[in-house]
Image (spheres, rainbow, N blue to C red):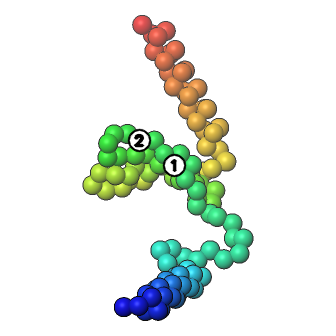
Amino acid sequence: MDYGNYFQFFLSLIFIIGLIFAFSLIAKKLGLGNGPAITGNRQKRLQIKEVRPLDAKRKVVIVQCDNKEHIILVGGTNDLLIDTIPSETSSNQADSQEDVIDFRKTDESTRV
């Protein structure tokens, strides 16, 4: 083989890689990829707020969707929705639950 054949092979390879790249961009724009195509400046409705590992297999995930936060246990044999709370009152509700827990602890200590 002479250098002309190598050069032709190299150009053909670059052309094929370019076609694959162009097709992947077109497929992504049409929504044929892993997920739906996000077009424009649409507001994202789903956010992962926090992830905490429990052990080697399981994690607790707080996911916010619209105005609700969902606490989900993932991993192991199946996933489990633990609780759903409104997003606006989540911090206020957590503070009030801590107050209730503290009140119960002081109430139990006074009984003894």
**Sequence-wise first label, 2 or 1:** 2
Question: Looking at this view, is 17 or 108 the one in front?
Answer: 17
Of the 4 image quadrants, the one containing the C terminus is top left
> Whole-percent x and y of residue 42?
69, 70
Question: Looking at this view, is 53 or 107 the one in front?
Answer: 53
> Whole-percent x and y of residue 21?
53, 81
Spot the residue most to the right.
41
> Whole-percent x and y of residue 8?
47, 92
> Is residue 20 among what the camera can see?
no
3D distance between C-alphas at marks 2 and 1: 12 Å
Look at the picture and state if 86 lies above or below 29.
above
Residue at 44 percent across and 51 percent down: it is 72
Residue at 36 percent across and 91 percent down: it is 1
> Which mark, by number, is residue 89?
none
> Whole-percent x and y of residue 91?
63, 39
Mark 1 residue crowding within 10 angstroms, few (<14) / some (14–19) / many (20+): many
Reading the image, the residue beneath label 1 is 62
Residue type indicated by callout 1 = Ile
Question: Looking at this view, is 50 or 98 the one in front?
Answer: 50
- The part of the image, by quadrant, that contains residue 43 is bottom right
Reading the image, the residue beneath label 2 is 53
Q: Is residue 43 left or right of residue 93?
A: right
Q: Secondary structure at mark 1?
A: strand
Q: Secondary structure at mark 2?
A: strand
Residue at 72 percent across and 71 percent down: it is 41
Look at the picture and state if 30 lies above or below 76.
below
Are the residues tagged 2 and 1 within 8 Å (C-beta)? no
> Is residue 63 among what the camera can see?
yes
